[in-house]
């Protein structure tokens, strides 16, 4: 129901199994569990949380049939820290970022890199795609004539159509022609956003490439923090919310449409992306004043 694949959990359970084999142990106990945890002291807190929780859940499952099975103390497990707030990328910053990318001097073996980065940034900002969805897009999933993407089997195993604006379609046609002229594989299963030689990006490789240009273009917030790739998705949602207020549209009516577009099961998931930004607050306050000022003034008289 939540769309989880449990790939990380499976990896960590296999990891502790390998650890026990190397230790010559037949089962887990407190001492071995502590030793296994120490092997991960260099990892991030979030990774250690998932790692230890996977083992705890497995041991808890075993306890249903094996009363003597070792079960870690839940209070001793790594605890997640507060999630960092997203950084909303402003429209002017996107212009700045695209200008920087267009001015890049590609290396001889990476002639298409500026065009690839430009297309990736445009799609992240204008469609709000998850980074994995963008990396997995193939040429077969792109229909520039009808102006749509087909997102296959994404989170919660859902597929969906994503409409594109006319200006994005123009960018896509130009980019696909550049790919073809550069001799990059144009078969249907070829990744749309690819490396300069046509290979597919991994999630981490794609994030590192985008992060590099964000830092180089000096795209950061007032605290000096640089956005993450997932912050493009937050920015897309907030920009949609701001656009509704600017156009005096009905926000409540449009929220389900945004949820559908972003591939969410319900607007509850979409609400996670709708940060209460100063510009949104200003528009919402003005709308509230227009609608209820007379009532409030009448109540105070």
Image (cartoon, rainbow, N blue to C red):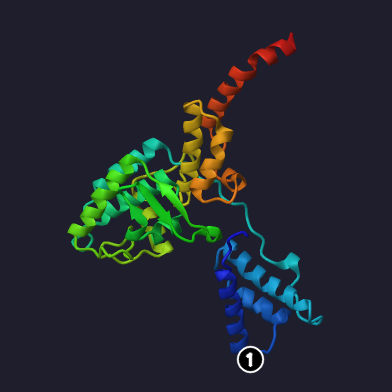
- For label 1, count other residues whose C-alpha is less than 10 Å away and answer few (under 14), some (14-19) or many (20+): few
Seen in the picture, residue 195 relative to 218 is either above or below; the reply is below
User: x%, y% of residue 188?
Assistant: 31, 63
Query: Residue 285: in sight, yes or no?
Result: yes
Q: Residue at x 74, y 78 (%)?
A: 62
Q: Nearer the viewer, residue 142 or 108?
A: 142
Q: Is 127 left, or right, of 108 in this rendering?
A: right
Report the label total: 1
Q: Residue at x 66, y 68 (%)?
A: 53
For label 1, the SS is loop
Seen in the picture, residue 70 relative to 135 is either above or below; the reply is below
The residue pinned by badge 1 equals 24
Q: Residue at x 64, y 58 (%)?
A: 80
User: x%, y% of residue 197?
Assistant: 25, 65
User: x%, y% of residue 289?
Assistant: 60, 19
User: x%, y% of residue 170?
Assistant: 27, 44
Instruction: Please state, as top left, top right, bottom left or bottom right, where the N terminus lies in the image.
Output: bottom right
Direction bottom: furthest residue: 24
Direction right: furthest residue: 67
Q: Residue at x 18, y 61 (%)?
A: 108
Direction top: furthest residue: 301
Instruction: Please state, as top left, top right, bottom left or bottom right, where the C terminus lies in the image.
Output: top right
**Residue 3 quadrant:** bottom right
Q: Is 199 left, or right, of 26 in this rendering?
A: left
Seen in the picture, residue 174 relative to 79 is either above or below; the reply is above
Q: Nearer the viewer, residue 283 or 39?
A: 283
Q: Nearer the viewer, residue 271 or 169?
A: 169
């Amino acid at each position: 129901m939540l769309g989880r694949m449990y790939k990380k959990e499976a990896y960590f359970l296999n990891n502790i199994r390998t650890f026990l084999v190397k230790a010559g142990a037949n089962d887990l106990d407190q001492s071995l569990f502590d030793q296994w945890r120490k092997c991960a002291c260099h990892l991030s807190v979030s990774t250690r949380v998932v790692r230890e929780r996977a083992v705890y859940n497995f041991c808890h499952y075993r306890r249903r049939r094996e009363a003597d099975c070792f079960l870690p103390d839940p209070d001793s497990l790594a605890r997640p820290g507060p999630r960092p707030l997203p950084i909303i990328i402003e429209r002017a910053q996107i212009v700045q970022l695209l200008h920087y990318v267009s001015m890049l001097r590609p290396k001889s073996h990476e002639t298409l890199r500026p065009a690839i980065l430009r297309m990736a940034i445009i799609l992240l900002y204008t469609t709000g795609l998850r980074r994995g969805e963008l990396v997995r897009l193939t040429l077969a999933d792109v229909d520039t004539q009808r102006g749509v993407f087909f997102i296959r089997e994404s989170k919660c195993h859902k597929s969906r159509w994503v409409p594109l604006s006319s200006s994005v379609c123009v960018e896509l046609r130009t980019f696909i022609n550049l790919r073809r002229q550069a001799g990059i594989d144009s078969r249907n299963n070829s990744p749309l956003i690819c490396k300069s030689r046509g290979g597919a990006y991994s999630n981490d490789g794609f994030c590192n490439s985008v992060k590099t240009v964000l830092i180089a273009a000096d795209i950061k917030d007032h605290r000096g923090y640089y956005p993450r790739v997932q912050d493009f998705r937050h920015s897309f949602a907030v920009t949609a919310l701001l656009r509704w207020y600017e156009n005096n549209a009905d926000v409540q009516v449009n929220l389900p449409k945004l949820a559908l577009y972003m591939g969410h099961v319900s607007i509850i998931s979409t609400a996670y992306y709708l940060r209460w930004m100063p510009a949104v607050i200003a528009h919402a306050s003005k709308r509230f004043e227009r609608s209820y000022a007379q009532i409030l003034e009448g109540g105070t008289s």
